[in-house]
Image (tube, helix red, strand yellow):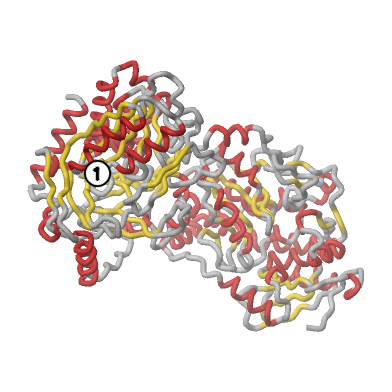
Amino acid sequence: MGVHGRADEQIREEEAVDVEWSGKWVAERLGVELVGDGELRELLGLALRRNPKRAHLLVSNVLGKHVPQRPSVVHGVGFELGERVRNLLGEAEARRAVVLGYAETATGLGHAVADGLGVAPYLHSTRRPVAGVAQAGGFEEAHSHATSHLLLPEDPDLLNASAEGSPLVLVDDEFSTGNTVLNTIRALHARYPRDRYVIVALVDMRSEADQGRLAEFAEEIGARVDLVARARGTVRLPDGVLEKGRDLVAAHEAGHAPDEPPAPRTVPARVALDWPAGVPDGGRHGFTPVHRAALEAALPDMAARIADAVGDARRVLVLGFEELMYAPLRLATALEDATTAEVRYSTTTRSPVLAVDDPGYAIRSRLVFPAHDDPADGPGDRYAYNVAGAGFDAVVAVVDSAGDTPALHAPDGLLARLAGHTDQVVLAVVPSYVPTSHRQEAAMLPEPLRGPAFSSYPADDVGWLLQDLSDTALEAPTEEREEAIQSGGAHYAESLPVEYQPSPRYQELFKAALDTSAARIARAVGTVTETVLAERGPRPVLVSLARAGTPVGVLMRRWAQHRHGLDLPHYAVSIVRGRGIDANALRWLAAHHDPADVVFVDGWTGKGAITRELAAALEEFGGFNPEIAVLADPGGCVRTYGTREDFLIPSACLNSTVSGLISRTVLRSDLVGPHDFHGAKFYSELADADVSGHFLDTVAARFDEVGDAVDAEAKELLAADRAPTWEGWAAVERISEEYGIHDVNLVKPGVGETTRVLLRRVPWKILAKRGAGADLDHVRLLAEQRGVPVEEVGELPYTCVGLIHPKYTRGATGADGTAVTAK
């Protein structure tokens, strides 16, 4: 039996079970009539939309958008339409055709039509701008709630009709008035004229008046325009239907309080798809027959991975994500072939529709959650229909990596909403496709620097996405740097402080602190690593923020290797407060790894400035998750941490000699060009004082003894509400005002940040929590050496806070930088 025959049979089977038409509720209350082919009511139901431009919504039973349907039916209907187009065009013209689908609803349908044609490349319009990709056109959809469509093909000649007889096949779910499609053809014809167009729709619902416009339009542009549809009919609307619909929606919503979302029944799990390299996630930038062949070959293995993840679930929903319809659809069809489970497919949507739990209404239930892909038009609600109450044992949520953001995983996000209605939620992430121009740009960048040529760490421990400035004189006296920074004459990243050389007494304090805290650090390393592995997949790519994050990234890598036998990639990148993250490093990472797998790592949080800096910097880079994993989060700034205690992490006690002999990172325009990584120095001359390896080995030696504690803590954290509280930021603002500083950048909270103040800046005073013990021994010693007062404070959310001298000048405080003691 062919695909078309199988799809028809399955539609009839569904109809035999569901005998009540799912448009009855709206038809009776609004007087709306659906008339046409005998198959029309099998294909369409009715619902009410919350849209000032249209009262009703035609809800397709075979599109896979609002109504969960067998994936073979969804793909089969589009495939059959593609076969009909191929027969209409003939083999020669079919080979020169290009298929264009409409976002968001018809992206999967258009792709299935292209599959039916078999030899045509596919492109769909998009509502998601992609930085650096030139527009090949765009158009407006007048009746939609989200009107702007962009065309962003990777191949700028994809829509060019210079070859004789290159038809354009435009695919939408319904051909209602014809305005959207005709406007598209008119806009594209002015830029890429051709002599033949084919319009494809599941249903042709034009009125008699609109039907005559197609022939007139074809004559106007001097081209042939054909129409291929699965069924034909029309909607008869009584006078005043828009107002009646609006009143009906308002009355229904007023009489039905919104449901409180149920508590999650399960913790979402992640499945690694092993998506084939180089295959786009869909048609946003174009999808060729070569891509199709590679995807088809990979589908059985990916379906087997999903089947293993859902186990013995008997009723499974594969849920796509807005424009990402085709990838989850094909995964669902492969899963249907690979398992005896009952598989259904649908996707989330931007479209706001009223839900009514009545068998004569097409939208029985609605899940509401916030947008999670940082859309260009800003935040807003998104929806999943007919999922709640549908009896699914497992839901496989499929998103692209640009949509795998903290909002997806938030307590009110999609995954949590799904977890309240099924026993099992599985997340599968498809890598967002990076156009060739971006990959070529990244290919021009150098490979990461590695030890022993750059850093004292072994080569496998970390790759530094930095350029080597070891031969450049960058150091300046601390006081000179402070005056320049505070006067606005220089940025802190344009020079380096002179490396602090610890006294014998200070070195002994470091060793004692390391011996005392090694087990506590090992436990925090294990806890944060286990949390990352549970939430971000089995093979995350660790990317530490140089340099404080790098020892933590190395330890996390060693934990994963020791406990799970995993060999995780680990890189170090530069991020500069006020200047952002190294964009070239991100491009290199995106070209070599799935951005969704990247986990940014830092040592600790203070007030959360770098957390915010990273989130802001990543807004223009799709696919990267801006959430940072840290060893210690005393500031309450992140969700992923080993502990929220503010305790001494010995790697904070020193500078390069505990960080692979690498300096702070440098960003200066005369040294770092537009195609360069940020810079840093390798202080190989300090090798005799290097304790980087000793620090790592001492902590790693305690991994086995903390294993049980880590398992318990990680399990507890994964089930807890870990939403950031930003308590640290509030405390810093209070301290800044209370001490007359009026600049939060001069208030450095926590043991690690206070140590940095004493080692690199001009400190004013140290606030120490009353009763703090050995965690502050090194702080007290450094303060004594620099003549800085230590003030004990009763109510302090941190163990200590370092205050940089406000409005520092050497004339005010002396060239030696000794702090004044008056408040």
How would you rate the neighbour count of disc 1 (Cα within 10 Å): few for under 14, some for 14-19, many for 20 or more? many
Residue 54 pos. (x, y %): 26, 55
Q: Residue furthest top?
A: 92
Looking at the rendered image, the quarter that the C terminus falls into is: bottom right
Image side of residue 738 versus residue 267, left or right = right
Residue 70 pos. (x, y %): 22, 40
Q: Residue at coordinates 86% horizontally, 65% vertically from top-left?
A: 479
Image side of residue 436 versus residue 229, left or right = right
Image side of residue 600 versus residue 750, left or right = left
Q: Secondary structure at mark 1?
A: loop
Q: Quadrant of residue 673?
A: top right
Image side of residue 575 versus residue 778, left or right = left
Q: 745 or 601, which is in the foreground?
A: 745
The residue identified by callout 1 is 176
Under mark 1, the amino acid is: Ser
Q: Residue at coordinates 67% horizontally, 38% vertically from top-left?
A: 448
Is residue 341 visible to the viewer in this orientation of the structure? Answer: no
